[in-house]
Image (tube, rainbow, N blue to C red):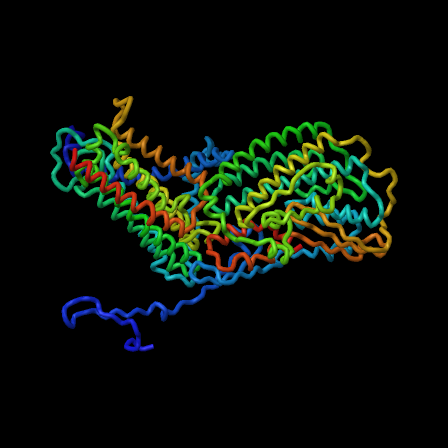
Amino acid sequence: MAVTELPTAGMLPGGPGEGVQVVIAGEELPTQEMTLSIGPQHPSTHGVLRVVLTLDGERIDTATPVIGYMHRAFDKLSEARDYRQIIALSNRHDWLSAFGNELGVALATERLMGIEAPERAQWIRMLMAEWNRVLNHLMFLGSFGLELGAMTPMFYAFREREDIQTLMEMATGARMHFTYCRVGGLKEDLPKGFLQYSEVLVKRIRHRLLDYEGLLLGNEIFKKRTVGIGVLPGEVAKSYGVTGPILHASGVAEDSRKTEPYLKYSEVDFEVPVGEHGDSFDRFNVLYHRIEQSLRIIEQVHAKLPAGPIMPGKMPKYLKPPEGWTYVRTENSLGETGYYLVSRGDTKPWRLKMRTPSFHNVSMIPYLLKGVLLPDLIAVLGSVFFVVGDVDR
Amino acid sequence: MIFYHFFSNPWAVFALKLAAVFIFFLTAPLVLGYVEHKGLAHMQSRLGPMEAGRFHGWAQLIADGVKFIQKEDIVPDAADRRIFMLAPMIVIIPVSLVFLVIPFGPAAVSCHAPAGTGGCGFWGENFDVGIFFVLAISAISVIGMLMAGWASANKFSLIGAIRGAAQLIAYELPLVLAASAVAMQAGTLSLVGIGDAQKAYWFVFPQIAGFIIFVIASLAELSRPPFDMPIADSEIIFGHMTEYTGIRFGLFLLSEYAGIVSLSAIAVVLYLGAWHGFIVPWIPGPIWTLAKIGALSFLVIWLRATYPRLREDQLQKMAWKYLIPIALVNILLTMIFKVVF
């Protein structure tokens, strides 16, 4: 458009004929969208997730998560390993909730074979699963703060995690990949002093949670950064298959520990914390309160843990589940983990398909990121709790 | 006798002062950096550096410096080479010049120094417009920041630099407004004069609003948490410093810590009574000044351990909607105070 055709060309006041012509050409200014590739190596994606953004200034137009950098073919590999080995495999895809993963495989195999773990083993499994949940959630509590620029919660979280890992190590011998479950029960019974230390830890962590409350939940800047950011309505969450704390934060209290109890979850008393608005703050808040609920369950396990064996008396030498299929859903730390297990009567499964929560959580990132600012990308990504290994498997 | 001759020569004394300022400029950031390493570590239930220099890692920062010098100085292919290499200097020189005018102690009673040699006292130079000088010159750094961000040919750098520039524009204003209220109260623009004027009471008491504004604006100008958006490491890697390596990166870091010391020093002179002590006034003035600078710098470190980062637009809102109006009201009140009393 030529300058003379512009409708709003006015004159600044001056002497007669001395005015300065002002051309308002705001709408005509050419702007260009910038493509920014966040990841796969980027400090805020904790892992090798890549998000390709198109930016208008600092506002995000589209966001496309690119996954697969950590694909390790667990599903396929499971078809070449026998049932005992799968347990050691499965606790590696989501390295932050190793016990929850192996528990699911053990439960699926047991259901297919028609055996049930002894009472004591079930209670101990529950205890370990809940400690694992606390371990996992602490990690996300800390890293969310770190991504928003608050360093300290991260180090506090690792201090607590260290204690819990010591506890888990007492029983399992491992700090991360526990491999404590066996088909039919557990590797071995709890060692001496485990329960005492566990009781001490519950108290200690409950006390130290107040630090997080002060540093993050009650922090004005933290609230400013997270309240109303990345709002996920419950209906949308359901349509994306989102589960776990993110779904709860959107106000849907779907938790397979409640709706389809496995182990002894029907015998303990706990609540599923839910959020109201489904924003980043609610997700974080739900995560925080889930830790409290887990500690509650752990305390009840301490009180109710029965004596007895931890493996059924007689187990077959080779695990050969009869032909058939089963689907087991467990509420893992980050959400619902499903195991679709098909057996053809062999020592190896014919197919093991895992339904992992992180994959579904990541799939709704484009929905959440549309139209938010670049700094809010962090507040959103940090609150969409995922582990990249769990996304890619 | 030779010493007498040496010290009676004002030019020799001036050269000595310059050397002292330079040494202070190089060492104070190191000390502060070490305190940050250890202080943050202990606040976060860690130990921090423990190995370098054997005793609690006291030599860690020196080791870091040596490492920075040894590293290869990489200039990206796409970068605007000359500007890229020049940017760290543009950032660091203004910061070092600020130290020249900060008074650490009172003026000597009798003084025979000729004009142009800085007068007699614990400072490098005593300008009549000292406060004007420090505020003007410390704002130059942002040009270096923009140069670095633009010349790096990196999108993260560019976003960081633009954020930095926007932040500086928003926060230079409350900083200057707060400082000008102090100048009005003291009746002088000279930093030494402002220090002298606080003999009876520190200006932090009448100017408490100004002090808070000054500290917040300084934090924003230094891009320190909670206002570290220009280098927000979880969003844009390291802002304008993303592409820098080796000693040039080291210079950026040095300028950050020197900036903390210099703005703390300015705040101490403007608000915290400069070299005037309390309770134990027999402690010499320069030690008081250093102690106050240390305390204020520690506050900056403390904030880093406590707060998450604000968002750029929230920061702008805070500056234009709250800090600047409050600073203007503060000036008005100071004016009324000066006229009435």
- Left or right, A240 with respect to B328, comes to right
- Left or right, A150 with respect to A364, comes to left
Picture coordinates of residue B315 (x, y %)? Answer: 38, 49
- B266 and A175: which is toward the camera: B266
Picture coordinates of residue A285 (x, y %)? Answer: 56, 43
Which quarter of the rendering shows the N terminus of chain B? top left
Picture coordinates of residue A98 (x, y %)? Answer: 68, 45
* Residue B78, image quadrant: bottom left
- Left or right, A42 with respect to A326, comes to left
Residue beneath the point at 57% across and 55% down: A49
Image: A20 above or below A218: below
Which quarter of the rendering shows the C terminus of chain B? top left
Residue beneath the point at 41% across and 44% down: B226
Q: From this viewpoint, is residue A359 visible?
A: no
* Residue B97, image quadrant: top left
* Residue A99, image quadrant: top right
Picture coordinates of residue B182 (x, y %)? Answer: 23, 39
The mark tally for this picture is 0
Residue beneath the point at 81% across and 42% down: A184
Q: From this viewpoint, is residue A287 visible?
A: yes
